[in-house]
Amino acid sequence: MTVEPGGRVRLATGVGTQGQGHFTAFAQIVAEVLGVDVADVHVITGDTREFHWGTGTFASRGAVVAGSACQAAALRVREKILELASHELEASKADLVLAGGSVHVRGDPGAGITLGALAVKANPLRGAVRPGTEPGLEATAYFGPDRGSTASGVHAMLVEVDPETAQVEIRRYVVVHDCGRVINPMIVDGQIHGGVAHGIGNAFYEQLVYDEDGQLLNASFMDYLLPTATDVPRVETAHRETPSPLNPMGAKGVGEAGAIPTGALFAQAVEDALGRTGLEICEIPLSPSRLFELIEEAR
């Protein structure tokens, strides 16, 4: 992480991204620590030209691992900012406030200096570096937890099933979810909504079918079903925040939380709706045709 002379903060992380909102979440984490606008944090992910070590994004580790590393680097840069500003403003670090892209003396916003101006002073064009200091307002940090932080929650759905056609309509879907500290509620909601859509696909539509020779039989979307916008219900969400003790931000993973419970819930809801038939569902994916077969067998 580097504070540039123009005042913008540049952040490079080794974690890859697949559209989970990492750019926004990481920028929020850094902006909160350094007292800058989120728009002034430029985030680069998964580029080995910028950061040589890293790995992909999986197992709900983006915010927990990479986010914690971003926060650690930001805290180190913050300490450098306060150290240099204390010298420039002739004030105790305890009396300094970071806000609006500047550092000022508490109670006197006029007595301050911008982070960009500090970055220039931290990179002297002439002379040696002062003893005990490092040039630049920059830092690199890593975070390696000894175990993962797992989210928890509850899913519930109401379904209607036509026993003659085996068509299922999800009338209501509710998720109460705890991913620890919520960095960006809109992104978390989006991940849960997307996860539920994945889960519905896994439960009722999607299946790779092979013949006895291992030949894939449904290799195109003519034969492979996917849930569309008309098949995915409006997902109602509520958040509970129980901070994780396993990382400094108190974050837990959110990526799997929408998808994993959905299949089991779907099977149980359909079985309950068809309770009078004596049907017991012990498998997914069901698919409309497979559910029809199970209903006929129960009869």
Image (spheres, grey):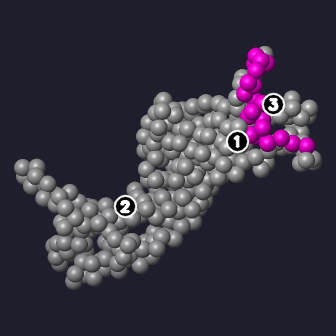
Q: What is the secondary structure assignment of the residue under circle 3?
A: helix
The quarter of the displayed image where residue 139 is located: top right
Marks 1 and 2 sit apart, C-alpha to C-alpha, by: 43 Å
Q: Point out the residue furthest to the left here.
A: 213
Marks 3 and 2 sit apart, C-alpha to C-alpha, by: 50 Å
| Residue 55 screen position, x and y as percent | 44, 36
Nearest to the observer: residue 276 or residue 31: 31
Q: Which mark is residue 6?
A: 1
* Magenta range: 111-130
Relative to 198, 293 lies left or right: left
Q: Which mark is residue 198?
A: 2
Q: Amino acid at mark 1?
A: Gly
Residue bearing mark 3: 84
Relative to 251, 202 lies left or right: left
Q: Amino acid at mark 3?
A: Leu
Q: Pointers 1 and 2 in contact (CB under 8 A)?
A: no
Q: In percent of the image, x 34 and y 71: which residue is there?
A: 228
Q: In percent of the image, x 41 and y 78: which residue is there?
A: 171
The quarter of the displayed image where residue 241 is located: bottom right
Q: Nearer the viewer, mark 1 or mark 2?
A: 1
